[in-house]
Image: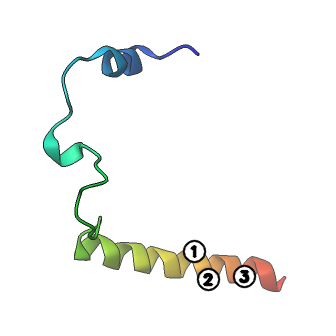
Amino acid sequence: MRAFPHQRLILESQSLPPAQYRYSFDAPAGSQFTKAEKVTHRALGKVVSSLVGVYVEK
């Protein structure tokens, strides 16, 4: 599998990502989104679900 140049830089990098971006099974459980992002996602979800309803009813 060929990597693009920007992917190659990431794969060949010897440095660790910043602590806030590291994945760990020991990390505390918690929300991944801010309250503002949740509100935005819910509003967009209502739009999408209404569009799905239009296609299902036809």
Disc on the earlier residue, 3 or 1: 1
Q: Residue at x 20, y 34 (%)?
A: 17
x, y percent for residue 25:
31, 53
Q: CA distance from mark 3 to mark 2?
A: 6 Å
Q: How is the image coloured?
A: rainbow
* Quadrant in the picture for the N terminus: top right
Q: Amino acid at mark 3?
A: Val
Q: Residue at x 49, y 16 (%)?
A: 3
Please report contact status of discs 1 and 2: CB closer than 8 Å, yes or no.
yes
Q: CA distance from mark 1 to mark 2?
A: 5 Å
* Quadrant in the picture for the C terminus: bottom right
x, y percent for residue 30:
26, 70
In the image, 27: left or right of 6? left
* Residue identified by numbered label 2: 50
User: Closest to the observer: 4 or 1?
Assistant: 1
Q: Amino acid at mark 1?
A: Val
Is the residue marked by circle 2 packed among few (<14), some (14-19), or many (20+) residues within 10 Å?
few
Q: Quadrant of residue 29?
A: bottom left
In the image, 3: left or right of 34? right
* Residue identified by numbered label 3: 54
Q: Amino acid at mark 2?
A: Ser
* Residue identified by numbered label 1: 48
